[in-house]
Amino acid sequence: MQKTAVFSQVNFVEVFSTKQGAVFQSDSEYCWYIDFAGKLARFDYRNLLKLRQAINNIDIEQILLNSGKTADVEIIFICACDHCYVLSLLEVIAMKELLSGTFVMLELNHIIQDRLFRIVA
Amino acid sequence: MKDIMRIKCLLSSDVETLLNQQIKKEALSSSIYLSMASWCNRNGYDFSSDYFFKQAEEERHHQLKFYKYVLDMGGNAISPEVTDIKLEYNSFREVFEEALDQEISVTQSIKNIAARCHKEQDYVTLEFLNWFFKEQREEEYKARRALELFEVIGEEGTGRWQIDKHVGQIKYDSEA
Ligand SMILES: [Fe+2]
Ligand SMILES: [Fe+2]
């Protein structure tokens, strides 16, 4: 969480990254930037939660067991959000990993903030 | 790095999910009571029908209380879908048995939310839940008393008519 990257004058802090992607937080904008599937997309608080929900609602096992001829592509569309993802099953799994890691790091940051600045020792 | 999650919302996502499940449970209770009011009315139990109409309104009030709390704390309150409401009951007694079952299940469910709040030290939600614990005391008491009328009065002869009359008079006025 120490790494700071500068993209077009916006200050990003990396929250979590995997081989497939990364999530950055912008303190000044109160939002997150997700670098995944070849694009950098901005998510505010509500939309980040909706994205997590949408990804978690995908039944990966069911898709794996599905022997139908339809392509195993998932379209992730989030209401009132500019972005939409069209992901293969492998990408869905990678996105799930990226987001769960991100939320763990956000939780860790919450604990650190509590311990360092909020709770009277 | 700013703690944006906490800045936006007081509730953890687990507690928020549990509260939304409870919103659904209260909505379900309200619909069940409304259905019971209809059954009692159709079968000539007017006092019991009134009693269940009142209960249905109370449950709606509980649902809104949870709903507004979630929103006030920065969470996302979800308007629930309620389906599969029973329309027919086998007997007058069965209606009251199921009413008590429903109240017990609500109490247990709120206890479970409180356990989660204790675990993550969410004393704010815990304090909010206290109102409901007191309410459940009354709700279970009334449902249990109603069912006991079947034992005390008995269903023979004009028994059910007597039971119906007494259901309207059940009150809980403990000062404790
Ligand atoms: Fe209730
Ligand atoms: Fe109730």
Image: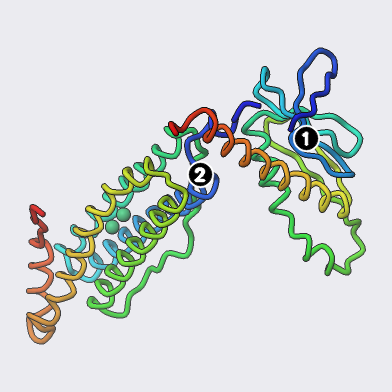
Q: In which quarter of the image is residue B37?
A: bottom left
Residue B113 visible at all: yes
Q: Please give the chain letter of the residue carrying mark 2.
A: B
- Amino acid beneath label 2: Ile
Report helix, strand or loop for mark 1.
Answer: strand
Mark 1 sits on what residue? A23
Query: Residue A21: image x %, image y %?
Result: 85, 39
**Please, which residue is most extreme toward the bottom here?**
B156
**B106 or B160: which is nearer to us?**
B106
Residue at 18% x, 69% y: name it: B44
Comparing B43 with B106, the one in front is B106
Residue A82 appears in view: no
Q: Which residue is drawn at 84% across and 33% down?
A: A35
On the rendered structure, is B77 left or right of A86? left
Q: Which mark is residue B45?
A: none
**Relative image position of residue A25 (x, y in whole percent):** 72, 28
